Image: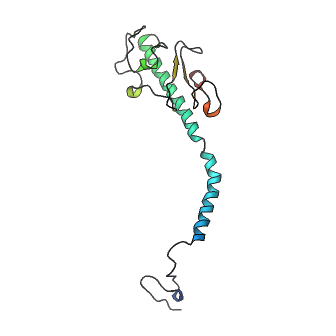
């Protein structure tokens, strides 16, 4: 069989299929079904990861705040009180005990107190119930207690 060129395509008798320029509906449906099957097996592995990531971020924030609190105490001899709060790490407190050697730029990076990953303030107690200070995020639901994504993240439980 001799092949003949015809405007970049060859006719059916010459081997090229000039009338087939795309995918058929059936071929597209097969691809959609295959993607659907893959999604049913792969998606559950990634579902819930956002909640895990938020819990990890809260733990990292608490460790960062703890480091800043230790530096504050090193400079001033005491931790900020509950009333002064974590804000004492970015703004010099003017209530007792007024820090004597407060660091000019504060103790937290970016000179702001982070909110927990759910957009709420961390609870700070000093003196704490479990330690010199306690830092708490109440998790996704914002209320004490809970399981899973609603579980509290507490400074005294971090390793």
Residue drawn 43% across the image and 20% down it: 87
- Asked if residue 4 is positioned above or below residue 33 in the image, the reply reads below
Q: Residue 127 location in percent, x, y?
A: 53, 12
Residue 149 lies, with reference to residue 14, above or below; the image says: above
The image quadrant where one finds the N terminus is bottom right
Residue 11: image location, x then y, percent = 50, 86
Say which residue appears at 39% left-offset and 14% top-offset.
93
Q: Find residue 19 and report its horizontal and vertical position in percent.
A: 50, 81
Against 136, residue 75 (above or below) is: above
To which quarter of the image does residue 33 belong? bottom right
Query: What's the colour scheme?
Result: rainbow
Q: Which residue is farthest left?
A: 104
Residue 159 seen in the figure: no
Residue 57, compared with residue 96, is above or below; it is: below
* 76 vs 17, nearest the viewer: 17
Name the residue at the top extreme. 96
In the picture, the quarter occupied by the C terminus is top right
Task: Please state if 2 lies on the left or on the right of 94 as rendered.
Answer: right
Question: Could you tell me residue 104's position as x and y percent?
Answer: 34, 18
């Amino acid at each position: 069989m001799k092949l003949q060129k015809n405007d970049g395509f060859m006719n059916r008798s010459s081997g090229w299929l000039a009338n087939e320029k795309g995918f058929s509906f059936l071929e597209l449906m097969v691809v959609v079904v295959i993607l659907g099957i893959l999604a049913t097996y792969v998606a559950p592995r990634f579902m819930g990861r956002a909640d895990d990531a938020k819990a990890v971020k809260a733990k990292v924030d608490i460790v960062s705040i703890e480091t800043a609190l230790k530096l504050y105490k090193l400079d001033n001899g005491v931790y900020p009180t509950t009333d002064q709060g974590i804000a004492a790490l970015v703004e010099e407190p003017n209530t007792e005990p007024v820090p004597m050697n407060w660091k000019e730029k504060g103790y937290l990076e970016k000179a702001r107190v982070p909110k927990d990953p759910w957009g709420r303030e961390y609870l700070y107690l000093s003196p704490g119930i479990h330690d010199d200070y306690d830092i708490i995020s109440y998790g996704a639901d914002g209320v004490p207690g809970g399981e899973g994504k609603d579980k509290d993240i507490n400074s005294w439980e971090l390793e």
